[in-house]
Image: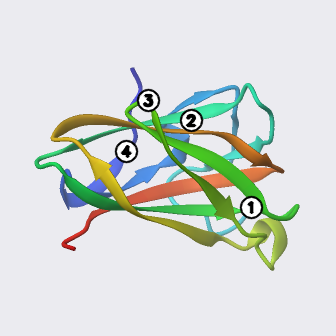
């Protein structure tokens, strides 16, 4: 099972590079400027494409997920599932600078269980999406 490269001081906070995630039929690229890590996942717009992120947390509590992305073809949507249950559909607004501009989509209040958790992203509202990284942060409220 592949896992993401993570940086951060604790397992509940860190940056997870998309190119290290377990992806299903999503190609990698490193041709657009400004990405982090060694690249990003690109050309994501088909129903059979998905991404699974494995994270471990020390305590059950709400977390914030921040996705760094580019949506040069217009608004995109992705379904987010946590531990197999649908959490929400997340909108990724079009990035004004096209594919060379990175944006951030934020999902607050994601309840993670103590220990191992999976965060899965599937096609939602269609359209192309490049995904660079996910930042996980525990929330105090």
Residue furthest left as drawn: 58
- Please tell me which residue is depicted at 80% across the width and 79% down the height of the picture: 96
Between 76 and 109, which is closer to the camera in this rendering? 109
State which tag comes first along the sequence, 2 or 3.
2
Structural crowding at the residue carrying mark 3, measured as other residues with C-alpha within 10 Å and reported as few (<14), some (14–19) or many (≥20): few
State which tag comes first along the sequence, 2 or 1.
1
Q: In what element is the residue under mark 4?
A: loop
Residue 30 in sight? no
Quadrant location, the N terminus: top left
Task: For marks 3 and 1, give the CA distance.
Answer: 32 Å
Structural crowding at the residue carrying mark 4, measured as other residues with C-alpha within 10 Å and reported as few (<14), some (14–19) or many (≥20): some
State which tag comes first along the sequence, 3 or 4.
4
State which tag comes first along the sequence, 3 or 1.
1
Task: For marks 3 and 4, give the CA distance.
Answer: 22 Å
The circle drawn on residue 5 is 4
Residue 98 position, x and y percent, is: 83, 71
Residue 54 position, x and y percent, is: 36, 36
State which tag comes first along the sequence, 4 or 2.
4
Residue furthest top as drawn: 1
The circle drawn on residue 32 is 1
Structural crowding at the residue carrying mark 2, measured as other residues with C-alpha within 10 Å and reported as few (<14), some (14–19) or many (≥20): some
């Amino acid at each position: 099972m592949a896992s993401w490269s993570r940086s951060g001081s604790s397992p509940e906070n860190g940056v997870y590079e998309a190119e290290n995630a377990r992806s299903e039929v999503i190609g990698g690229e490193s041709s657009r400027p400004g990405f982090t890590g060694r690249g990003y996942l690109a050309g994501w717009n088909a129903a059979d494409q998905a991404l699974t992120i494995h994270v471990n947390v020390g305590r059950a509590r709400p977390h914030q997920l921040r996705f760094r992305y580019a949506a040069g073809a217009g608004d995109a949507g992705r379904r987010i599932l946590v531990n197999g249950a649908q959490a929400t559909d997340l909108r990724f607004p079009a990035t004004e600078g096209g594919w060379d501009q990175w944006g951030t989509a934020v999902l607050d209040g994601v309840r993670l269980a103590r220990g191992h958790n999976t965060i899965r992203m599937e096609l939602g509202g269609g359209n192309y999406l490049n995904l660079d990284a996910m930042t996980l942060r525990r929330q105090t409220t």
